[in-house]
Structures are given as C-alpha cells and as structure tokens.
Amino acid sequence: MSRAFLIVLDSVGIGGAPDAADFFNGNLPDTGANTVAHIAQACANGLADYGRSGPLWVPNLDSLGLGAAVQFASGDATPGLNAEPVGLWGAATERSLGKDTPSGHWELAGVPVPWDWHYFPNENPAFPEFLVKALSIAAKTDGILGNCHAPGIEIMDALGAEHIATGWPICYTSVDSVIQIAAHEDHFGLDRLLALCRDVAPLLHKMKVGRVIARPFVGSAQDGFTRTLNRRDFAIDPPSPTLCDWVHDVGRQVNGVGKIGDIFSMRGIDSITKGSDADLMGEITRLIQDADDGSLTFANLVEFDSHFGHRRDVAGYASALEMFDVWLGTALLSLKHGDMLLITADHGNDPTWPGTDHTRERVPVLIAGAGSGSFGHIGFCDVAASVADHLGVTSQGPGKSFL
C-alpha cells in the first residue's frame, strides 16, 4: 500500500504571486518578493558568505525541480539552480486571503479559508481594551506589556527585564492574524503561560484571530534572553475536514511532525513530534523506515521562517536550505516502493525584503516517487487532492489531482 510524506518548508516561496501587490510589509507591497531566487542571487554575488560561502548548493532540491519551479513561477534568475528536473514539479498559487501559517497549511490540506481574518492595527496600543482586560484576568496580573506590533526577538530583549520585575506577560502581534504571548519559563512558568494562551484562545478565535502563540523564553538581562523549543500554537479549528481527517477517517495513520498538530488542532492526527528542524528531519527519517503502509506523514519545518526569514538572515536561510538538501539526498535513497515524498511551502518570507513579515509568493511543489515532468500551475488545494489520490483516499475538497 502507498505511503505519502508531505513536507512543508515553512516560508520557502518562489515569487510570482499574481496578487502580491495586495499584500504589504509596512507600506511596501510584496510585488517582486522571491525568497528562493533572492537567496540564490545573494549567494552568487558573495553577499551570504558568513557561516557558509559560494553559490547556493542544493543539488537534490534542484534535481526535483526547484530552480525550474522558481523560473516558471516568476521568471527570476536562480544562479546555481539550473538542473534538468528528474522529479515531478510545478508551482502552487494560494487563493486564501492570507500569507500566514494556518491559511497556507489549511489550503494545502484541501480547505481554503472561507472568512476574512481579524488583524490588529499597527498602532500603540494595538489591542482593544476588552482584550487587554481578558488577557490580564487570565494571567492574574494587573496588566500586560507590549500591546503593539513587534518582532518577537526584539520585544523579548526590550521588555524581558520589565516582564521579570512586574510579572506581566509580553503580548504583541504582527501583520498576521495572531497574538503572541511571551513569558519567562522560570519566573512566569511554562505551564502558566500555556494555560493563559489556552484560556484566551476561544475569545480570539471568536474574533477570527487565527492563532494564539505561546512564546516561552529563558535567560536574563545580563546574559541575554533566548526562546526555548516549548512554543505552542493554539489555532482556530479548520472549518471543514482536511486531508488529515480524510486519511484518518478511513483508518489510516496520520503522523504530525513539527507544528502540524497545533495548526490542525490535532484533528485527524494520530501522533505528533516536536523539536528543532534537525530533530524533525531525524523523525521523518525514522518514519520513512517505520511508518505504516497507507499512512500520511505531514511535516512542517519552521526554522526557515522563524530563525532566518523574519530575522532577514540571508546566509542563515541559505545554510538551512543546504542542510535540508543534504538530509534530502539520504531520504530519497531510503524511500520504499510506492512512497511519494512531496515538498512544498505555505508562503514566502524573503530575507532580502524590507520589513520582517511574510511575503506573498507562489510556492514550489516538488515530488519524488510519482514520475517526472511538469504539471505547471496548480492551486494549493490540488496538493491535498493529489496526496489523497496517491493514498487511494477520497478527496473532499475543491482541489483536483495532478497525478
């Protein structure tokens, strides 16, 4: 029986989104953003030579069609990515009106977002008074810190000491439909932070805010603050059954790797594994060896986005792509007869782009184990339909299989 491994490289966009002009970083539209192409160009021009050097070197991704997909999606040059693809490849365009994690993943799993997300204004304060009160009551504090749009690392560094002194949680947002709550694991408590996020999530979800994210950290003002791996996303439930449900409901195993359990509120998911991207790649390797026949392994590797895209770290992003590519070379050799491995992304986060937010882009769809050639432009929902087709499961969404 066939198995499927669906791996989302969080934020690895390839430019060319037809509606990019409708999405912004500050006052700048995302028109022209291209995560992979701009990283490749920076590497070729010697602008990403700290921690690594030379042109972007991802031969396994390129052999599956990464360079071809970028050029097809956007027409942008990809120095060093010129392989003739041996995999099945194309480019996917999102129709949901968001460039965020839930929108991208839900639609890749066959469910476009049917509503308009609620976004908090880029003002100070950003949150309405009733929400500040609800957050304070849930935290059992007299108030909150932050209450603004901010990059997570910067606001943690700026307010970490005050947070320890007052005990007030640091609450902030971005251009995404999200509220993030940061607190010190020792001084505030990890369990208390998770309970706070869990308690306020229903109110935020009723407002159509996509996620409440717990952002625990450790450290001190003297030695610096550092986020831990105990992040937890409390996401709004998908509005209808997703690929995970389609597979689970016919008695197949669904393995969630990374943030997948949080993104889908554990619906239709049998097991979850969390950790660093290196840990998660190790878990996918194990599942390639051991996962049940007929199973779906659905993985999100977030560090491209969280560690390098938002921080506008071009060299770090390039290094992460190169590290994944090394792992991919081994993984491809480990696949069993009947397996399909599909690599895609949920949005872009061009590290050369002004601002610190996601960028609206098409994404690559690169497949091993399903032949070769190009299927051209598809919608995100077609990914779910195609995975279901490969597994012999009925697709319940609007997508069509390209297999």
Image (cartoon, rainbow, N blue to C red):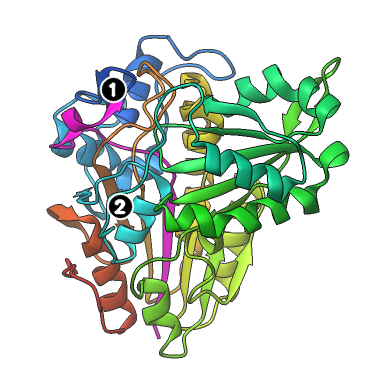
Write down the quadrant of residue 183 in the picture. Answer: top right
Residue 79 appears left or right of 125: left
For mark 2, give the secondary structure: strand
The image quadrant that residue 323 belongs to is top right
Residue 331 is at least partly visible in this image:
no
- Magenta stretch: give its range: 1-24
Q: Earlier in the sequence, mark 1 or mark 2?
A: 1
Distance of mark 1 from mark 2, alpha carbons? 19 Å
Q: What's the residue type where badge 1 is placed?
A: Pro
Relative image position of residue 275 (x, y in whole percent): 67, 51
Tell me the residue that label 1 is attached to: 79
**Residue depth check, mark 1 versus mark 2: number of the one nearer the observer:** 2
Residue at 28 percent across and 58 percent down: it is 113
Residue under pointer 2:
366
Q: Which amino acid does label 2 sit on?
A: Leu
Image marks 1 and 2: residues in contact by CB distance under 8 Å: no
Labelled disc at residue 115: none
- Front one among 202 and 105: 202
Counting from the top left corner in percent of width and height, residue 346 is at 36, 47
